[in-house]
Image (cartoon, coloured by chain):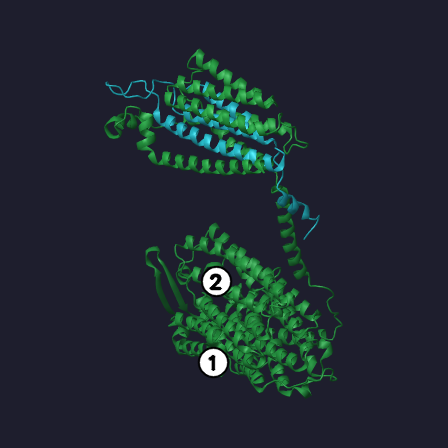
Amino acid sequence: MIPSLALSFFAAAALLAGFGRRLRRTAVWLALAPSVAAAATLLAHAPRVLDGEPVRESISWVPSLGVSLEFSLDGAALAMGLVVSLVGAAILAYTVWYQRDPIPLLGRLNLFAGAMFGLTVSDNLFGLFVFWELTTIVSYSLIAYDDRSPDARKAGVHALFVTALGGLVMLVGFVVLGTEAGTYRISEIAAAPPSGPAVTAALALVLAGVLTKSAQVPFHGWLPAAMAAPTPASAFLHAATMVKAGVFLAIRLAPVAMGNDVWQGVLLTAGIATMAVGGWAALRERDLKRILAYGTVAQLGLLTVLAASEATVAASVALLLAHAGFKAALFMVVGSIDKATGTRDIRELGGLRRTLPGTWVVAVAAAASMAGIPLTLGFVAKEAALDALLAASPAIAAAVAAGAVLTVAYTTRILGVFWGPERTAPSSSPAPGMTAAAALLAAAGVAFGIAPGPVEALSGSAARAAGAAAVALPAWPGPKPALWLSLGSLAAGWLAALLPIGPRRGTAAASAAFDATVDGVLGFARRATAVLQNGSLPVYLAVILATVVAVPGAALVTAAASPAGLVPAESWLQAAVGAAAAAAAVGLLALRNRLGAILLLGVVGYGMAGLFALQGAPDLALTQVLVETVTLVVFALVLGRLPERFDRPARPAVGAPIRVALALAVGVFVTGAMLSAAAGRADAPVSEAYLERSLDEGYGRNVVNVILTDFRALDTFGEIAVVATAAIGVAGLAAGIRGRSER
Amino acid sequence: MTLLLPVLAGVLFAGGTYLVLTRALARILVGLALLAHGANLLLLSAGGRAGAPAFIGEAGAPETAADPLPQALALTAIVITFAVTAFLAALAARAHHLTGSDAVEDDVEDRRVARSTPEGTS
């Protein structure tokens, strides 16, 4: 049942992509159907889940490997799932009127909703990861939706880079966590949480995913840039759902992670820094959508702080629900203003209270919840958070209150566009459907602010699933320190909005840092390519040979051994032949006359034949004599065409000292490796069996021949193939040379 | 095992390495031939001490028969080396025929990539 809900989103997306344009108006209903179905199903399951009975489902996928698709609908999943389906439905409805050609956008939003829903209900770390990365990819395609805009494409790549990299690091953490726990099923990990240094390392890796996805400092730059997306996508992905995935995962992993100092320390530090950076940046922005984006960054910081401690988990879920509602509504409001007036700059907007009255009412209701004015869900959630924090950690409570001051200040700035003198007159008024969709969400914020019972049940159930305590969410807390703190920050924020905080000049620091990082990586890659792939064959060879000497050579030095029964030479004759071959080889190095080179090479080759014969290998000796003779003929023919003397090239690729040093090192390495390898012999040679079986099975008395034609005939077949291929190549090359000469 | 064969193989490898690192095509060819001889010697010396040829007479294999397997491997290697050397020689002759030079030049494309990298970024 649960997985089929996720599937229905994907099916709708596929149908919209395939037949959307032909379906016309039916397509709208098709786009909305999965969200409505999901919401209805979740609400039907809600009573059981709220009683603490999660719905678990498992589909066996690869039973032999123990891989199955596991889903769980617990309190946290229910809360997030309702956001995805209900807020999603409102945004999809808004899209129908907002977008000129809504079908493709509706399709992609459904694709995203399916991925996000799957992430929400996944009970398996790998399943969660797959959906997590799927939301990243769909987010990329939505940010870069206007694919003709370079800015949009760049913003899409920025988001993709940061969140996908974080996700990959997180995957490593998942693997470690699952290995430590002995299961990848999240509910089982939560039931018996593992601990130890490996788990701390795993959690640190998972944090990379949490912080990038939820746009925490210093990774927050992608979220304001992502405002290049169509406004419904911004409302859905970059305000209501996807950016909450990090916080959601933190709540999901709370039973394992909550007591971990590293986890909690990083979340608190990043969260508080993000609150400050986001809130301040929002005050410096003049573009409505970017103000909201930085506001989202700040609120995500607050959510991260709340998700870090047991006492505030319930409040974090309540605030997550409140934020999804008011921020999505405000994005819709901004979309409506943008569509009606053609601008989002607060300096060009004013007096919209009179010209866009419906939008004004919605904006005020949603902004009240964002600022935390009593009788809104935002107030209830923030009040619960402050109350819990004042008891647990007054310092953090003070930081949160300071963040609230900034929130109130930029909220006041946003609402400023509705008052004052009229600047840009709207050329049209927003479609009633757009206002209605936003109004639904704004109204929900007020309704649950007056009667927070359902949110209290939902957040309590989510907190209990995370191993934390539920908290009461009263509509009016009564005179408590938290209330004075709340009201104080409201007043301070309203005053702060009057401060002349100037607009930002140039690009944001986080954006510039990302650009510099990407440029730095590309520049390093280019320089590395220029150095390593310099086009010189001798340099490549030198690098390879130096590696051979350095890496296995280092191992050889530590494990050098001498074989037993080592004799200097078999006989004086062998020593003499070997010395002659060695002398000829050394002579070759100095010689630059080609005829002399051919002769000396011949000495080496026939010397080899002599050594083979003395070793007891007549076949080898015969072959060597034969091959050496033919080789000398070939060389004489070829070198006859090359210059009389080997020219000294103008500039050697590898200097002579390096060549000599490398040559000596390779020589010593080969000798040492051979001696050590011989010393390492542990078993009797396999050839004893060959000697025994040669006559009976191979019907041959020459064992070497029987090996070549029978025991290892496949090797010989390969050898013949090489010879044939080389012969074809030689024939072709030689024909080319002759043809040229005759012309 | 005799010390002579591994030492001689080392000498051949050293000489071959020195030669293949030069730019003259003909010297590279000679260097490859030396490397191949060295490799064959290594195979042979892996068989241990010298012995009688591995022929089975009426009385069975000789007690002191040399290890036949490395011989078979070396034999295969000799033939393949010959084939490859002949191909390289033909390639060298063709290259000289076309360019009039027997030097191994740097890859033009790679040089272009390296040159196109300005100092600093992008």
Chain B drawn colour: cyan
Which amino acid, mark 2? Ala
Residue A459 in view? no
Q: Position of residue B81 (x, y in %)?
A: 46, 31
Measured in 3D between alpha carbons, the distance from the residue under mark 1 to the one under mark 2, in whole angstroms, is 45 Å
Q: Quadrant of the rendered structure where residue A737 is?
A: top right
Of A8 and B97, which appears nearest the observer? B97
Q: Quadrant of the N terminus of chain B?
A: top left
* Mark with earlier residue (1, 2): 1
Which amino acid, mark 1? Leu
- What residue is drawn where x is 54% and y is 20%? A600
Q: Chain of mark 2?
A: A
**Viewer-side label of 1, 2:** 1
User: Extreme front residue here?
Assistant: A743
Q: Which residue is mark 2?
A: A254
Q: Position of residue A491 (x, y in %)?
A: 68, 77
Q: Which residue is mark 1?
A: A23
Residue A374 falls left or right of residue A713: right
